[in-house]
Image: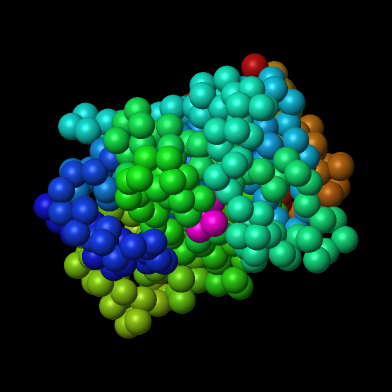
Amino acid sequence: MDNVIEILKARHLFEAMTDPALETALRKPVTLYAGFDPSAPSLQVGNLATIMALAHFQQCGHRVIAVVGGGTGLIGDPSGKSAERALPDVETARRNVEGIRENLSRFLGQPAAPARIVDNHDWLGNFAFIEFLRDVGKHFRMGAMLGRESVRARLAGEAGMSFAEFSYPLLQACDFLKLFDAEQCVLQIGGADQWGNITAGIDLIGRLRNAVAYGLTLPLVCDSSGQKLGKSEGNAVYLDAARTPPYDFYQFFLRTEDVDVVRLLKIFTLLPLEAIHDLEACVREQPEKRDAQRRLADEVTRLVHGEDGLRAARIASSVLFGESMEGLRAEDLLRVFADVPSRTLSRAEVEGRSVVDVAAASGLCASKGEARRLIESRGLYLNNRRVETPRTRVALSDLLDGRLLVFRSGKKTFVLVEVS
């Protein structure tokens, strides 16, 4: 079997493991899991690193389980948080679980070894409080729990920590124990901030089953300024097209700094390392071409949104950066300009009329005089072609796909005209 630990290290997906014996254990197929918190109806780019790590385990012949936290999500993981998060109601949590199930199914459904996707509410929701305290709580010592850095930091602050949050590691430990019993799962992986939660499960399995289990953590993925790529940091890029459209997703990766692009290619793509090394040479020798950034944007957008999503993102990029619109389909343009002002005009108001009249009627310009001045200053564009003179008239051949016009002022102000 391929050495998955070495693969993860080479791709910046390895932080630490709880026991060096894990490398020996991984010489044979094992069952492992990672958990995903349903605090939103979609995962985001920060979660994609964990998904890619699971994919590498799959490719190396290991059996993967993805746990959606329908139960733990009702409490909220305090790891890395300076204050208690707002708890979702049951219906919101249920919708979030379904959204995350959909996200995960896109990445982990390899035909040869599809991942199992489970909801921990299926077992945590059945616990009675007294049963939980007797069967789980009695095996955890307060001193060790209070000694964790995340707990100490919270208790030292004004916000403190609720008993519900304090109990969170016990719930996650129950997940590991349940999967150990039902699926022979011996490994949990997660971000570096999950170390305490992971070791809680390992300790519980050791106490109750007198068995060895393992943990492995991944570095938290940060941008070039050191900000964590996560929804709680205000820079979230979601995996759901309804929350982050493919164009915005594509542009996020296209804007990657040179200093970050090779690392992100290793983390977020399955490109062979040899191909990434070639792109690294391009960054070093011809950075102005941004070949590595384009390849990163292509690969990750295709992975998350498929070929159709990548095609839509490329079209949007070309259109919004001033390239030709000739031959584009109306549905593509409507998707690109879904969030810009639009106006419906009749064919009689458009065909053969002065571009000055139509630009004013579209709402791009407040008046015909403003439209003339914009043309004279070389700042008015029709379908990304500069309008050279106020005498220009709109022809039938100007209609994109027979029914759309796009006016632009300067570089970024667009109005879409639908011709009825």
Relative placement, left or right, of 32 versus 222 is: left
Q: Position of residue 127 (x, y in %)?
A: 59, 24
Residue drawn where x is 85% and y is 47% of the image: 369
Q: Quadrant of residue 303?
A: top left
Residue at x-position 18% and y-position 32%: 112
- In this picture, residue 130 sits left or right of residue 268: right
Residue pictured at 73% horizontal, 31% vertical? 88
Residue 412 shows in this picture? no
Q: Is residue 413 part of the magenta span, yes or no?
A: no
User: Where is residue 130 shown, x and y percent of the image?
Assistant: 66, 27
Residue 98, picture quadrant: top right
User: Who is closer to the viewer here, 312 or 200?
Assistant: 200
Which residue is nearer to you in this view: 104 or 21? Answer: 21
Q: Position of residue 274 (x, y in %)?
A: 19, 67
Name the foreground residue: 271 vs 196: 196
Q: Position of residue 271 (x, y in %)?
A: 26, 57
Q: Is 246 rendered above or below residue 106?
A: below
Closest to the observer: 235 or 321?
A: 235
- For the C terminus, the image quarter is top right
Determine whether, in the image, residue 331 is placed left or right of residue 216. Answer: right
- Going by the image, does 353 lie left or right of 261? right
Q: For the view shown, which residue lies furthest in the bottom direction? A: 285
Instruction: Please tell me whether the stretch drawn in magenta is mainly helix, strand or loop.
Output: helix
In the image, the segment drawn in magenta is 194-198
